[in-house]
Amino acid sequence: MKLLRSLGSRLALWAMAGATLVVLAALTITWFTLRRQMLASVDRSLERGLAWVVDKPVSTEMGMVEDRLAVEMVDPYGSPMGLCVVDKANNASIFQSTLWMQGVGSNNLPDELVQAAKFSLDNRDTSASRVITKTVETSGGPYRLGVLATREALYGASFSLLPALAESRSLALETLWALPAGLAVAAMAGWLLARRALQPVRALSFAMERITAQGLDQRVLPQGKAEEFQHLISLFNRMMERLEAGFAENRRFTGDAAHELRTPLTILQGRLEQRLQDPKLGPDEQDFIADLLNDIARLKAILEKLLLISLSDSGAMPIHPASLDLALLAEEMCDDIRLVDPKRVIHFKHDGDTRLHADRGLVSQVIQNLLSNAQKYSDKDGPIAVSVNNGAGYVCLRVTNAGRGIPWEQREQIFDRFYRLEKSRSRALGGAGLGLALAREIARAHHGDLTLVDGAPERITFELRLPKGETNKTNNTTKPMPKAKH
C-alpha cells in the first residue's frame, strides 16, 4: 500500500498499535481490579449481614428476620441477601430464606466452607468464627457465599453476583465504545509527533528536489535539536558546498576556454583566408587551406555551443524574447534546406495561430539543428516532414525523417553532451554531440522542452514545445513543460 510507504504513516500506525496494546492491557488490569473490588465489597456486605443475624435468637420462625434482610441487607449492587441456618449438633436445617440459593451441598452449605468455618472457630477465643467466602456457580447464576460458625449453629449468607457482573459488563462496554476514539486520538497524536519529528527530513527532501545545475546554492537551515538530524543536515550542506564549488569551477573553465580559444581561431581563420587569396597557390594548396578553414569553422561552432551551454548551466543564457511566428520561421528554414539540398523533399504544414514570444536567434538554432540532423541521418534523399501546431498555451513543432530508429535505452542519452549514437558516422558528418544537448537547454531556457517522441517504425520524430507567454531575459530554471501524451 502506498500509505505504508510513508515513514510518518508507519510511525502513526505503530503508535496506534502500541496504544492499542497499552489500552488492552489497562482494560485487562482494570477488569481484574474491578472484579476484586466488587468481590471485596460484596464480602463486606456478607460480613455485615451475618454479624447482624448472629445476634438474633436461633428459631425456625425467623420470618421477621427475612423481611429485614430483604430490606436492609442489600449489597452495593442492589442484590438482597439470602440466609441459611444449620444446627451444628444434628446438622439439621433450622431456617432457610426464600432468597437462598439452591443445590450447594448438604443442608445447602458447601462442606469445604463449613469445615473452614469450624476450623476458624476452633482457633479463636471468640464466640463466632471469621466469615469464609467463596464464589459458587449455580443453575441460577454465580453467587457469593459466606459461612460463619458459632458454638450452636452454622450461618450461611449469599448474594447473587448477576447485578454486580452486569454493572461490570456495562462499564467494560462503555470503555470499549470509547476505545476507537482513543485509538484515533493516539493515531493522530502519533502522526503529528512523527510529522514534527520528520520536519528536518522534509526540509532536506524539499532542498534536494530544487537541486539543479543552477540551484546548487540550496542549503538547509538547522531543524530542531536532534543531533542525528543536525549531523545529517550539516553533511548535506557541506556536500552542496563542494558540488557548487566544483560546478562553478567547471563552468568557469568552459567559459574561459571558449573565450581564450575564440581569438586565436579568428586570427588563424583570417590569415588562412588571406593566404587563400594568393594567386601563386596551386590547386592542392588551395584545397588544403579550404579544408583547414572548414575545420576552424567547425571548431568555432563547437566553442559557441560550449559557451552557450556554460551560460545555461550558470543560469545566465541571454534571452531576448520578441514576438515571432514559429510556423513562418520554420518554413523559411525549410526553404534554406531546399536551396542547399534541392533533391530533398520537405513536407511542411502548420495549423492555427503559431505566434509566441521567444528569442528568434536561439529558436532558429534549435530548428536548424533539428533540420540538419534530419538531413544528415535520414535515408538517402529521404523525405523530411515538418509540422507546426497550435496547442493549449503552447506551440508545437515536429520534425520527422525516415531512418533507423533509436534504441529505447538511448532515447534520453542522445541529449547528453558529446554523446553520439554512431560515433564514426557523426565524425564523418561533422557532428560533435553538442547539438541536441544545446537545443534542449535552449528549449528549457524558454520554459519549454525538446523530446524524442514515439512514432512509426523507421521514423524519427523530435518535438519542440514552447509556451506562448513571454520568457525571462535570462534562463533561471531548467524545469521542462509537461510532456504531451502520444
Image (tube, grey):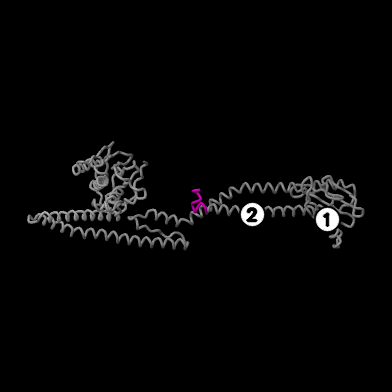
Residue 129, horizontal then vertical, whole percent: 84, 58
The residue where tag 2 is placed is: 26
Please identify the residue farthest to the top as the structure is shown: 352
Question: Which residue is most to the right?
Answer: 90
Q: Which residue occupies the foreground of this view, 382 or 465?
A: 382
Quadrant in which residue 264 is drawn? bottom left
Residue at the (19%, 56%) spot, across then down: 296
Q: Can I make out residue 399 in this image?
A: no
Does the residue at mark 1 contact the one at mark 2 (Cβ under 8 Å)?
no
Structural distance between the alpha carbons of marks 1 and 2: 35 Å
- Amino acid carrying mark 1 in the image: Glu
Q: Sequence-wise, which precedes: disc 1 or disc 2?
A: 2
Q: Position of residue 126 (x, y in %)?
A: 86, 61
Magenta stretch: helix, strand or loop mostly: helix
The reply, left or right, for residue 250 in relation to residue 170 is: left
Q: Position of residue 98 (x, y in %)?
A: 84, 44
Asked if residue 336 is among those painted magenta in the image, a careful observer would answer: no
Nearer the camera: disc 1 or disc 2:
1
Q: Amino acid at mark 2?
A: Ala
Q: Secondary structure at mark 2?
A: helix
Spot occupied by residue 349 in the image (x, y as percentages of width and height) = 26, 37
Q: Which residues are magenta?
A: 1-10
Mark 1 residue crowding within 10 angstroms, few (<14) / some (14–19) / many (20+): few
Residue 3 part of the magenta segment:
yes
Element under label 1?
helix
The residue nearer to you, when weighing 324 against 256, is 256
**Which residue is the site of mark 1?**
112
Could you say which quadrant of the image residue 462 lies in? top left
At 85% from the left edge and 63% from the top edge, which residue is drawn? 123
